[in-house]
Structures are given as structure tokens and as C-alpha cells.
Image (tube, helix red, strand yellow):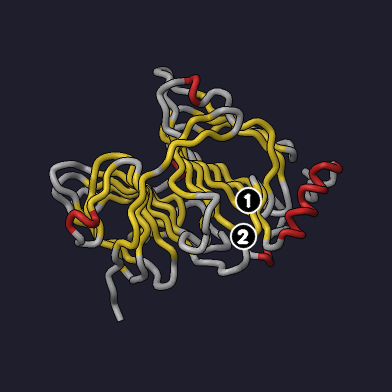
Amino acid sequence: MSRQRKVRTVSASKPTMEGAGVRLRRAFGFGDTDETDPFLLLDDFRGEKPADYLAGFPWHPHRGIETITYILEGTVEHGDSMGNKGTIGAGDTQWMTAGSGIIHQEMPKGDAKGRMGGFQLWDNLPASRKMMDPRYRDVKSDQIPEVTTSAGVRIRVVCGEVDGQRGPVQDVVIDPEYLDVRLPPRTEYTHPTRFGHTVFAYVFDGEACFCDQGNAGRVGDANLVLFDDGDRLVVSTGERPVRFLLISGKPIREPVAWHGPIVMNTREELRVAFEEYDKGTFIKARS
């Protein structure tokens, strides 16, 4: 039976500091993962002061997860223990599967005006894939299709499918959808969603009303909206436009043992991971 999703919660992202001293806003993460399963963390690292981000994220390990970086402004230079290196810029995406283990660094740089902006999302891997070989997928802006509806809604499709346009990132365990959505003023848009999948939106410009819920569903910049289950999502704008990330994925529903950049299923697996890191045996796959 068809059912429109309703707003479950609205929450403001919170200022925090990560890496070597990067000031950012955390929409969710390092808490109860049940409501956002399979997603673990979403960070908003938009900033206009180089001192807030230039220290970056020096060499650190990951195991058991995927990290997805989406850039709005500026660039991020990256390198890893497998010899990969490169730079992603405005409109680009990096989808990194840490799998059995990788050590990498991410160093943000501002644009000509000193602005830096983007998001990093972590999604979990099921136990059966925790130790898969690591892989990178760097996707340039011009590889990401953009769909424009008759009402002027613009949707960049990083992962998933909209109106027959499939995003370039495919073959992901949690069957995710990752969209960058823009609505002009006085517009309504209905987006199909899968029953049973976790769905959330993160507004980063303007304001919108979600799920026909009036003021209860009205959301502005730097706020996260988590939705109840259903097969469609309705969003509308008033006098202001809106831009937001719309993200969904299939829950894993497994135990989560999490410490810092490593996410496993048991505390014993965590202990082994950090012991291997200390001994220099953390990396399983070689370039």
C-alpha cells in the first residue's frame, strides 16, 4: 500500500572539531546508530576561514566502512597507503571503501576567496564485507548526471536513479541513493523512496517544508531531517529556494562496535584492528 513518508525528527547539526583541528558541523555520528542505520556519520565542513580547515585530516586508518566526500567549494588533496593520490574539487565526489583497512590523509584547500565546503558521509559495511579489498572511486563533476524536472527542480545523481538517469557510483553494498536536490521558490516535488530503507535530508541552503507537515516539517540551513517509512517523499518551498542532500540506504541491522575511524561488529574485532595498526600489520591489500 502506498504511503507518504512523515518527518520523524528534525535536528540542527552541531559544531565540533576533527582531524588536526578542522572546525565543522556534525549532523549525526558517534552515538546511537539504530535510527540512521546503515549510515554512521555526516559532517558538514563548509567554512570561509582557512584557519578553520587547513590543518586537515593527516594520516589515519579506516576499516569496516565507506567514506563519501562531496565537494561544493575548494579542493581536497588525498593520498593513501596503497599509493593512490589525487585532488577532488567543486562538484566532485570520492567514494572510498576502506574494507579490510586503509591509511590515508585528506587535506582541504580553499578556493580563490578562501572558501571551503562539502560533506563527508560514513556508511557501514555488513560483517560479510568488512574485510573486502579497499577501493576508491573518484567521480568528477561532469560525470554526475543532472536531471531537471518540468517544474525546474534540479537533481544531481551521485548514486541511485532519477527519471532513468543513473548515478556513476554503482555496486554499493547498502544499495544507496545520494542526491543533491535544488527546488526553486513556490515548487513542490515528490520523490519515490523504497519501503524499509533509511531516508534523510540535510538542508544546506534556503528552506523547505517536508511531508506536508506545515511548520513541523519546515527546515532551514544546517538541519537534518530523518523520515519515517514510506514509498514517497514530498518537499515544497515557499518564497525561498532550497538545496539539500537526499540520502537513503538499506539498513544492515547488525551489532556495531565503533572506536574512532574503525567500525566493526564486536569489541574483539576492534581490539585486533588497533593491535594490528600498532604492529604495522593493519594493511591487508597491497597496491
Can residue 141 be seen?
A: no
| Disc 1 secondary structure class | strand
Q: Residue 137's spot in the image, x, y percent?
A: 58, 46
Q: Earlier in the sequence, mark 1 or mark 2?
A: 1
Mark 1 or mark 2, whichever is nearer to me: 2
18 on left or right of 114 = right
User: Which residue position holds label 2?
Assistant: 125
Q: Amino acid at mark 2?
A: Leu
Q: Quadrant of the C terminus?
A: top right
The residue tagged with tag 2: helix, strand or loop?
A: loop
* Above or below: residue 22 compared with residue 179: above
Q: Residue 112, position in %: x, y?
A: 42, 18
Residue at the image position 40 percent from the left and 23 percent from the top: 48
The picture places residue 93, in percent across and down from the top left corner, at: 50, 42
Can you tell which mark lies on residue 97?
1
| Residue drawn 59% across the image and 51% down it | 66
Q: How many marks?
A: 2
Tell me the quadrant of the picture where the N terminus can be found: bottom left
Residue 87 in sight: yes
